[in-house]
Amino acid sequence: MANDGSISRQPSLSDLDAPGFDPVAAGFTAADILRFSASHLERARRLVESVRVLARAPDAALVYASVLAPLDEVAFATALAGGFAGLMEETHPDGAVREAARACRPRLVTFQTDMMLDAELADVVRRFSTSAAAAELTGTSQRLLKELLREFRRNGLELPPADQVRLRELNDELNRAAQDFSKNLAEATGSVRVSPVRLRGLPDAFLAAHPPEADGLVTITTDYPDYFPVVCYAEDRELARELNSIFDSRAAAENVPLLERVLALRADKARLLGYATWADYVLESRMARTPDAVRDFLAGAAAAVREPGRREYAEFQAERSLALGVPEGLPIPVYDRLYLEQRLREKKYGYDGKALSEYFPVEGVVSGVLGLVSRLFGLEFVPRPEAPRWHADVRVLDLLRGGVVAGRLFLDLFPREAKYKHAAMFEIRPGKRLADGTYATPMTALVTNFPAPDAGPALLTLEDVTTFFHELGHALHHLLTQEELASYSGTSTAQDFVETPSQMLEEWAFQREVLDAFARHYVTGAAVPEPLFAAMLRARAFGRALATERQLALAALDFEYHTQPTPLATDVVFREVMARTQQFAHQPETRFQATFGHLMGYDAGYYGYQWALAIARDVLTRFEREGFMSRATAADWLEQVLSRGGGADEATLVQAFLGRPTNLEAYAAFLRGEAATQ
C-alpha cells in the first residue's frame, strides 16, 4: 500500500512516541539510551520468536504476514536499537553517556548473530520460499525473501556447530575492535602551540578566531577547522609538516595493532564462511560482485588520470621549487598538495580560495542550501526549537512534503571535545509502513565539524560547502524514502551505490544560480563577483587528477588490506601501495592507517566512492541538459531513485531515471577535466 500523503493517515512524531518509536524523545541519559535500545531488542526477539514457532505449524500458516512481515519489523526494531545509540556514541558531550551507548552495539551484534544462526527460523523462511504464497510475491517483498535466504548462508547457518561457536566469537571481537578503533580516533585531538608570526598566509577570519593566549602563543589543533586551513594556506611549511605529522598519526599506538587484529579476524571469518578473502565475502552483496570487477574498475580509473596526473604533478614540482626553493626533482610531501594546488589555481586562473570563503559564512550557507533544496524538491524545513536535542548547538528541523511531516533532520555542525571528527549522516530511525497503515517517518542527523560562529567570523571553504551538499544528499536519500519495508528504507542500498545521491548533489555548489541564492559576503552582503566565480570554474578541474589519484590510492590500500594473507604489517603494505599508486610522499614517521576511519565501515569497499561517482556523473548528464533547478527533473530523481531506497536493483533505478543503461563516459570525461558529451 503506497503512502497517500494525506494528513489523516500521516502520524505525527508525538504519535510515534507512544509505542516508543522516537529514540530522541526517549532521552539522553545513559539509562535512557540503554533502556530504549534494550526495549527494541526485546521487541525484535519477540518478533523472531513469533516466526520460529511456525516451525511446528502447517504449511498453510506460512504466509507473508506471518513470516516476512515480522522479519521486516525486526529490521525496524534493530535499526531503532542501534541507530540512535551509535549517534550518541559519536556525538554526546558526556563521556559516561558515550560509554553507555557503546554498550548497546555488542548486544545488537549478539542478537543479529543469534538470529542468523537460528536453524528453526531459517527453516521457516525456507519452507515459505517454496510455498504458493511466496510464488505470488513481487517487488520488495520478493527481494526481501531472496536476500534473507542469501544472508542466512552468508552468516554461517550452514556451518557445523563448532564453527558457529567460532563465528560468534569472531563477530563479538570484531565489533569490540571496530568500536575501540573509532573511539580512539574520536578522542585523539593533537595540537601544536605556535607564535602568531608562524600563521602568515592564514585567512583573516582564521586569525581572528585564534587569538594569542596569555603566554603569547596560539593553539592549533588537528580538528578539521584548524588542520585544513593550515596545510592549505600557511606560508610556514614547517608548521604544516609539524601539524600533519600529528594529524596522520592520531591514535597510532592504539589503532595500528587494532587494525592488524581486525584484518586477521576478518580473514579468519571469510575463510570460515568459505570465501577466499574478506573482499570476496563483502563484494557478494555489492553492485561490483567480485574482486576482479573492482580491480578492473580501479585500473581503468587510474589509467584515465595517469597522464593528467603526471602533468599536474610536474606543475606542482615547478611551483614548489619557485615558492619554497626546493629542487624540482624531489618528491612533494603530501601535506604540500593543497598548498601548491591553491597557489597554482590563483596564479593560473586568478582563483583565490580565501577570497571565496568570505562569501560562505556558515549560517548563510546552511540556511541557503536548505532553502535551495526546498525549492528544487518542493519541500519545507520547519525549525523545531522546542524539540529535545543532545547538545545546545544541535538544530532540529521537520521536513515537510506537501504540508505533511515526512521526516526530521538534526544538524550537529560544530566541533567539540570527543565528538566525531569527520562529516557524516547518522540514521536515527528508518521509514516504514506500520501495521495500522500509518507511515513511520524517518529521522536522521547530519554531523560536521564546521567553524562555529561564536568564535569570530565562521567562514566555510568551497570544500566545506560541497561537504554540506554531500551529507545533505545522504539525508535526503534517507528522509524522502517511501519504501514500505524498513529493510530497504532510504540509504539501505548496496554500499557501492549509497554515495551516488550525495556525490551527485555536490555539483549544485558549482552552479551560478545556486550560489546566487545563498553565497553572500560576510561583511558587505554582496554576491560572489563574476570574475571570482569564473575563476572558480576555470580552476575547478585543476588538481582533480591528483585528488582522484589519492582516492584511488586509498581504495587500493583498503583492497590490499582485505585481500592479502594475514597477519600482515600494515605499515609495509601502506608504503608499497602508496609508492605504486600516487606520486606524493607520506611522512615516514606517520601511520596514516591508524586514522583511516573508513576501514571500519567501508572495509574492502572504499572503492565505492569512485564507483558511485561514476554513476553520479552519468546521472548529472540529464540535469545538465534539463537544468539544475528543473523541478520536473528533480521530481523524477526523487520518485525514480531517492524514494525507492534499496527496493530494487540500483542499476535498474538509475536506468529508469536516465532512460538508458548507465555507462562510464561522463565519469571518464570528468576525470580528464572535460565536459561530458551525453
Image (cartoon, helix red, strand yellow):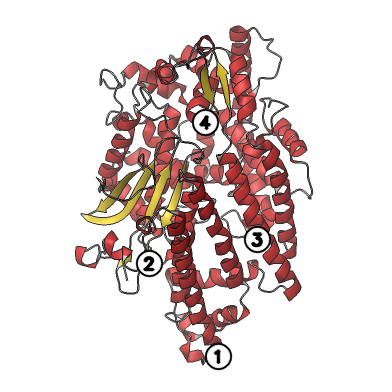
The kind of residue on which mark 4 rests is Asp
Q: Secondary structure at mark 4?
A: loop
Q: Is residue 405 left or right of residue 331?
A: left
Check disc 3 and report the residue beneath it: 172
Q: Quadrant of residue 508?
A: top left
Q: Secondary structure at mark 2?
A: loop
Q: CA distance from mark 3 to mark 2?
A: 32 Å
Upstream in sequence: badge 3 or badge 2:
3
- Select label 2 or label 1 by which is in front: 1
Query: Which quadrant does the C terminus fall into?
Result: top left
Disc 1 vs disc 3: Cβ atoms closer than 8 Å?
no
In the rendered image, is residue 541 in sight? no
The residue shown at (48%, 79%) is 67
Q: Quadrant of residue 235?
A: top right
The residue shown at (67%, 26%) is 583
Can you tell which mark lies on residue 223? Answer: 4
User: What is the total number of numbered labels drawn onto the structure image?
Assistant: 4
Check disc 2 and report the residue beneath it: 484
The kind of residue on which mark 1 rests is Arg
The kind of residue on which mark 3 rests is Asp
Crowd class of label 2 (few under 14; some 14 to 19; many from 20; radius 10 Å): many
Picture layout, residue 313 above or below residue 71: above
